[in-house]
Amino acid sequence: MSFTSREFRDALGCFATGVCVITANPKGFEPFGMTVNSFASVSLEPPLVLWSMQKDSECMPALQAAKQFSVNILRQHQQDVSDRYARKGDHALESGTYHQGKSGCVVLEDCLANFECDIEAIHDGGDHIVIVGRVLEIENRPTGKPLLFYSGKYAELR
């Protein structure tokens, strides 16, 4: 390789992404949330999405116990939600900020969209795992602007 990890990270930062919070309520754990920007669609038929998580994440034990998760796409005004669930040691969902979706997954309130998913597959991805989910239900409220992340900081559409 002719580049450092920092150079690689900086180059990846040139790709603007949306910001979402993954939520789950696995048996034996409190409902939790974690901020990610590694969300992507995979397939329309069947409806599949993916996201990734560091193998040493403190949320790993809870995720390993989960059978389902939700992807909650944040609105531009929800930067505080993103910041909260990005902090180490602070992943328990706050009462009154979520509800149980149609499939039984926990979903955050007031997001642009929520995808309730069964875990379809988990793949090794270097220092991350890649989680593929089969979408069971969606809530879609596409009014407003998305919270974006670009070049290491929040950004907005103009």
Image (tube, helix red, strand yellow):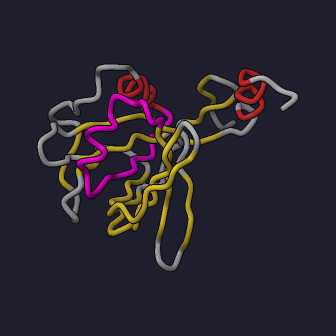
The reply, left or right, for residue 98 in relation to residue 75 is left
Is residue 37 one of those drawn in magenta? no
The residue depicted at 37 percent of the width and 54 percent of the height is 114
Q: Position of residue 152 (x, y in %)?
A: 64, 23
The residue depicted at 52 percent of the width and 50 percent of the height is 124
Q: Quadrant of residue 115?
A: bottom left
Q: How many marks?
A: 0
The reply, left or right, for residue 89 in relation to residue 21 is left
The C terminus: image quadrant? top right
- In the image, 47 versus 72, the foreground residue is 47
The residue depicted at 36 percent of the width and 23 percent of the height is 84
Q: Specify the farthest residue to the right.
A: 2
Residue 33 higher or lower than 52, as above or below: above
Residue 125 higher or lower than 139, as above or below: above
Residue 151 higher or lower than 34, as above or below: above
The N terminus: image quadrant? top right
- In the image, 99 versus 61, the foreground residue is 61
Q: Position of residue 93 (x, y in %)?
A: 23, 33
Q: Which residues are magenta?
A: 54-76
- In the image, 112 versus 12, the foreground residue is 12
The residue depicted at 18 percent of the width and 53 percent of the height is 100
Is residue 75 one of those drawn in magenta? yes
